Amino acid sequence: MLELENHKFEIKSAELNFKQRNYRGESIVTVQIMIEFFPSLVNDNIVSGTIEVKLDTNKVKSIKDIENNTFKGDIGNVMIAVLNNGNFEYLSKDEFEISFKEKNNRKIEFTLKLDNCILNTEATMVSLYTTSTDKKDLKDKFDLSDFYDTYIEKEMGKNKILKFFVKE
């Protein structure tokens, strides 16, 4: 359930992906969650929207590192896009708190807190992708045991993209 500015919304979908990259010799992982909420009547207006959470950290080396863990402060970005009677409204915050529970297969419950917004829901973990490392190097930076051995590899210009999918 989402409570945004004292109004409740039902969650339509929530998808979680991991992105690994190397920055100045350090492995950085972005935990990216896309949430969509159903339209609801608020003060005679039809309101719906999306929330995109990007948690950037050097402390995540596996899915287990987010389980039963809380991250807070200036840790990434939350972008809330609301469609209010056909007009878009945006809110962007860099300071927030996000707490994860234990995973259950591909699902993980989490709570997101920021100004005038509390979100309690479950996200489906889908994939991990990287543009800055090969598979051998990635295994040293991120535990792939929760992912299928088969992956997708694509080249875009000089970059190689590897995408792994979370096991059921």
Image (tube, rainbow, N blue to C red):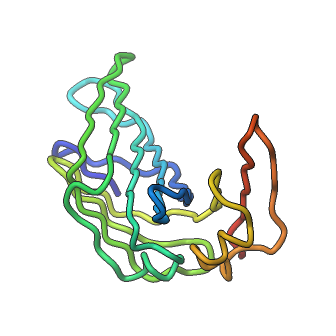
Tell me: 75 left or right of 49: left
Q: Residue at x 53, y 77 (%)?
A: 62
Nearest to the observer: residue 52 or residue 41: 52
Q: Residue at x 36, y 37 (%)?
A: 40
All told, the count of numbered labels is 0
**Residue 79 location (% of width, % of height):** 34, 39
Nearest to the observer: residue 117 or residue 70: 70
Nearest to the observer: residue 13 or residue 39: 13
**Residue 7 location (% of width, % of height):** 22, 44
Quarter of the figure that contains the N terminus: bottom left
Give residue 57's quadrant in the image: bottom left
Give above or below for 98 relative to 52.
Answer: below
Nearest to the observer: residue 12 or residue 105: 105
Tell me: 46 left or right of 16: left
Which residue reaches farthest front?
Answer: 25
Give above or below for 92 relative to 21.
Answer: above
Q: Residue at x 39, y 73 (%)?
A: 59
**Residue 137 location (% of width, % of height):** 67, 70
